[in-house]
Amino acid sequence: MNKYLSISPEVQEALREGKPVVALESTIISHGMPYPQNVETALRVEQTIRDNGAVPATIAIIGGKLKAGCTPEEIEYLGHKGQAVTKASRRDLPVLIARGADGATTVTTTMIIAAMAGIRVFATGGIGGVHRGAETTMDISADLEELAQTPVMVICAGAKSILDLGLTLEYLETKGVPVIGYGTEELPAFYTRQSGFKVDYRIDTPQELAAAFRAKLDMGLQGGMLVTNPIPEEYSMPPEIINRAIDEAIKEANQLGIRGKQTTPFLLAKVKELTSGDSLASNIQLVLNNARLAALTAAELAK
Ligand code: PSU
Ligand code: MN
């Protein structure tokens, strides 16, 4: 174990005893939702994981330490500080750690820290991917490279169509990342259950998710697995409304010349603003839904 990693006593004990543990990211807290809903949701997600038989490990960088397992006080701190916390991807780790700084972990860095701690299952909302227009901007999220190299199962609700979903799937195919649809053959698109794209495999049970990932680990095949779990029907949003908001957000980002790590948070905030509170309520529900599936899958993997 490296000296920068700090695992909470509860998570440490669960890992030592081979109990199921589920990792959670912190960018969704500091950058993904407004305060105080972000803190309330993060705590509810942890409770959902406990209710389904696993131990939650919210991951973040606090005072230069890689935390696997945050206290409620640390979650409150990250949520209250919000956008002022650095959004930390793989390239940010060395300097943030050397400076003893804070960082909100993206899918990428949550996977890195989970793997360091020995946590195999991670639940979140949406992942980064290949942005629309990437053929000229080369804006491709580091999340895809991490899925290609780090052995963690990521359970999400698909990707938002702020991305080019077709190119995102092509990239994952090239990198050898299995894309699973939970109970569906179609890739879900976060707020909606449909995207028009197919996943690689449909799997219907946590048992089979665990068996497939176990086989990948046993073979020593590097990289993770992407499980896409559609938002529950009753919380899904009308595609026309969400797609109109996304098109508008992308147009505005282009006009303003938004680039680099600002792109995703800008688009997410804009879409949220354009769809008012509706998208926030859906966002919360899909994360809870993913937390439930992750806990059940981690329990199967621990058997
Ligand atoms: N997509 C979402 N919600 C999110 C993110 C992406 O629908 O909260 C966050 C995640 O933390 C993800 C990161 O890992 O944005 C990707 O950022 P980028 O595109 O800059 O790699
Ligand atoms: Mn990017």
Image: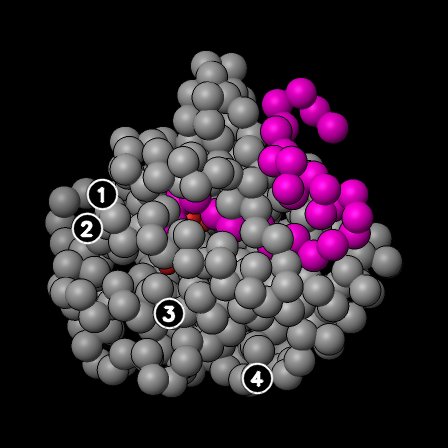
Which disc is residue 258 wearing?
1
Which disc is residue 183 wearing?
4
Span of residues in magenta: 1-28
Q: Name the element at disc 3.
A: helix
| Relative to 1, 185 lies left or right | left
Which disc is residue 285 wearing?
3
Q: Total label count? A: 4
Q: Earlier in the sequence, mark 3 or mark 1?
A: 1
Which quadrant of the rendered structure holds the N terminus?
top right
Q: Amino acid at mark 3?
A: Gln
Question: Are the two marked residues, 3 and 1, in contact with CB atoms closer than 8 angstroms?
Answer: no
Q: Where residue 2 appears, x then y in whole percent?
A: 70, 24
> Which of 108/277 is in front?
277
Q: Residues within 10 Å of mark 3 (few under 14, many from 20)?
A: many
Residue 293, quarter of the rendered image: bottom right
Which residue shows up at 78% across the image and 43% down it? 16
Q: Where residue 195 appears, x then y in whole percent?
A: 40, 79
Q: Amino acid at mark 1?
A: Ile
Residue 267, quarter of the rendered image: bottom left
Q: Residues within 10 Å of mark 2 (few under 14, many from 20)?
A: some
* Residue wearing tag 2: 253
Q: CA distance from mark 2 to mark 3?
A: 27 Å
Q: Amino acid at mark 4?
A: Gly
Q: Residues within 10 Å of mark 4 (few under 14, many from 20)?
A: some
> Which of 78/124 is in front?
78
Q: Report the mark closest to the observer, 2 or 4.
A: 4
Q: Report the mark closest to the observer, 1 or 4.
A: 4
Q: CA distance from mark 3 to mark 1?
A: 29 Å
Q: CA distance from mark 2 to mark 4?
A: 35 Å
